[in-house]
């Protein structure tokens, strides 16, 4: 009977579900495990809180091309600039 | 003695500087220009960097001055600041102040500012991870890369990836609990 998850498996499913990559069945097993396991319950709570927090921060990143442009500019400055 | 590594600056700090800037100038192009000016100014004055502050703090101090200069410039173009209060119609005399107050259900500037500071706190915590962990975590969590693409890019197996992600998430939770949640 492989109905009950071990803790390390539960933690892995919990990580995957933060990225919507856990299957329905996996999530169900996780829920069952969490009902019984205090440790994983705490972990799952903090893990989801991290996901929510990062989403709500709405962090913007520069596109790779834009970073590349910045690098090129800097490199030019280093090459041409007065050596001091 | 070489204290600074300009080549790594962009990878390490541009997202942080960008998030700091965008909430203050609210224009993508302007923000990018200010960041590039900041890096260049940093490069020119790197002999003044004593290594007492972290590089990031030092770059932010340059960036702050650039942002202030930016507002000085656009303000001097405008001539002077003017404040207009318009009555929406003539009969609405009396309660204009209340009527013109911002909609409380609108997300206000302070909320937005708070959110941006949260963004910076998250990026600061990211700094504490190893470089590989930080990049992979950022790509997966903030830039929404999918697992397969990341595994290919870094030539790792999915289970390697999940181990990295798991460790990164653990440190991030610890760090944010210390620096943000209380």
Image: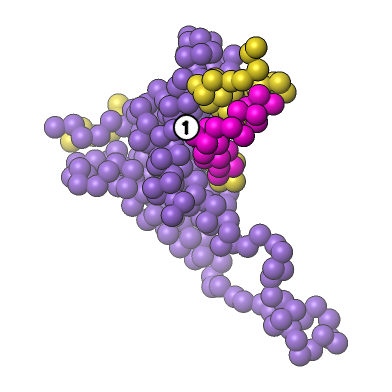
**What residue is rendered at 44% in x and 50% in y?**
B180
Chain bearing tag 1 is B
Query: Which residue is the site of mark 1?
Result: B169
**What residue is rendered at 55% in x and 32% in y?**
A37
Looking at the image, residue B85 sits to the left or right of residue A34; the answer is right
Provide residue B140's location: percent of width, then percent of height: 55, 26
**What residue is rendered at 54% in x and 73% in y?**
B80
- Is residue B10 placed above or below B104 in the rendered structure? above
Q: Is residue A61 visible?
A: no
Looking at the image, residue B78 sits to the left or right of residue A68; the answer is right
Provide residue A80's location: percent of width, then percent of height: 30, 29
Q: Closer to the camera, B27 or A27?
A: A27
- Is residue B54 placed above or below A1 in the rendered structure? below
Q: Closer to the camera, A10 or A79?
A: A10
Start-end of magenta stretch: A27-53
Provide residue A33's location: percent of width, then percent of height: 60, 28
Which of the chains is purple? Answer: B
Q: Closer to the camera, A33 or B173?
A: A33
Instruction: Tell me the quarter of the image containing the C terminus of chain B.
Output: bottom left
């Amino acid at each position: 009977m492989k109905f009950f998850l071990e803790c390390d498996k539960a933690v892995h499913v919990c990580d995957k579900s933060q990225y919507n990559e856990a299957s329905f069945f996996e999530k169900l097993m996780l829920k069952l495990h969490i009902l019984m396991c205090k440790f994983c319950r705490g972990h799952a709570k903090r893990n989801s809180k991290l996901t929510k927090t990062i989403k709500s921060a709405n962090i913007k990143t520069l596109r790779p091309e834009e970073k590349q442009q910045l690098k090129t500019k800097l490199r030019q400055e280093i090459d041409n600039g007065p050596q001091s | 003695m070489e204290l600074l590594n300009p080549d790594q600056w962009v990878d390490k700090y541009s997202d942080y500087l960008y998030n700091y800037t965008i909430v203050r100038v609210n224009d993508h192009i302007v923000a990018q220009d200010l960041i590039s000016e900041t890096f260049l100014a940093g490069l020119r004055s790197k002999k003044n960097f004593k290594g007492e502050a972290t590089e990031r703090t030092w770059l932010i101090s340059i960036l702050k001055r650039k942002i202030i200069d930016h507002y000085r410039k656009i303000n001097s173009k405008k001539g002077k600041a003017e404040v207009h209060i318009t009555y929406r119609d003539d009969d609405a005399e009396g309660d204009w102040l209340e009527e013109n107050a911002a909609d409380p259900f609108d997300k206000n500037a302070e909320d937005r500012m708070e959110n941006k500071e949260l963004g910076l706190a998250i990026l600061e915590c990211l700094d504490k991870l190893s470089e590989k962990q930080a990049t992979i975590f950022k790509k997966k969590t903030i830039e929404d890369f999918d697992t397969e693409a990341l595994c290919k890019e870094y030539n790792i197996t999915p289970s390697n990836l999940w181990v990295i992600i798991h460790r990164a998430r653990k440190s991030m939770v610890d760090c944010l609990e210390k620096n943000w949640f209380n």
